[in-house]
Amino acid sequence: AVQKKLEGLGIAGHSQTIHQRITVVPDRVFIHPIPQFMDNVAYLIVCCPPRKLSGGVTGLSPTGHESVDNGYETPVIGVLVDCGEANVILGYLECIYEQYYSLYPRSNAFVTPSTRMGIALHSILCTHRHHDHTAGVGELVEHLESIRHDFKKKTAVVVHGGVGASEGQKNLFDRVVGNVVVVGAAMERVPHQTLFVKNGCFIPLPCIEDNDMNKFVSIEVINVPSHTRGSVVYALRNRVAPDIALTLSESTEAMGPL
């Protein structure tokens, strides 16, 4: 049904990635590939909120094994790697939520109920500056800015850098347009970039209330000057097994020790 919805929207893309999901931390952190243009792929990293022991409305978890409490307003958090087509990303965000995470509450950080998104996207990590990986960044950030609450209002959801964030990083997300941090190499200067990183940096990841992605994974920047002089790879590590990394780059995805 979700694949047909994507086809109806004209954004199904070059492959049926809606049926693909990579587990990084069981029940908490997953990766979803999203097709872009004719032969590119973006990656959505999501972090699910913790389960409560009692109260609220219960149902099966996305993996179908345990009961979850979805009667509280802690949404699934999203981090995106590359964005060539904003409309495709937005369509997949909704379809991925419907397919895998609909038992979790939608974010209440949006102006009207009709604009509430199921996956709260707060970071875009760019591998390099070329348009097929960055052309949709500005449109996506502007769209999120137009439908999100002003984070200075009492009704807003506070997003910060979570565990291990420095004082300067804790309010990083509410200082940028649309509450979306756009990350890229310092020498690359990708469009709409707001966080400039270099080799060996660790990206501050979003945290909303008790859903802190930083507790489970880390993302390290690795310079790979080749395709462009500022190309980078993002090494996603499960904190329980940090010697194994899943590397996200402009063209390939591979799992193994670095």
Image (spheres, rainbow, N blue to C red):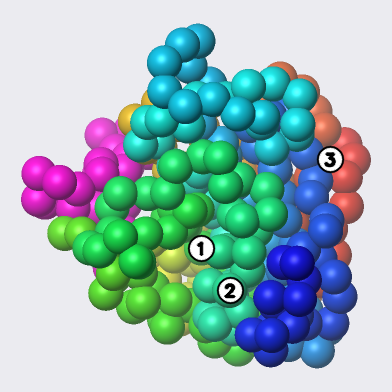
Between marks 1 and 3 in the image, the one whose residue lies nearer the viewer: 1
- Which SS class for mark 2? helix
Q: With 99 as the anchor, is 122 left or right in this view?
A: left
Q: Amino acid at mark 2?
A: Gly
Residue furthest to the top in view is 53
Residue matched to label 3: 258
N-term mark: 1 or 2: 2
| Residue 145 in sight | yes
Q: Residue at x 80, y 46 (%)?
A: 22
**Quadrant of residue 179 within the rendered picture:** bottom left
Residue 249 is situated, as x and y percent measured from the top left of the image, at: 75, 63
**Quadrant of residue 145 within the rendered picture:** bottom left
Q: Amino acid at mark 3?
A: Leu
**Quadrant of residue 13 within the rendered picture:** bottom right
Question: Where does the magenta region start and end?
Answer: 151-179
Q: Is residue 189 magenta?
A: no
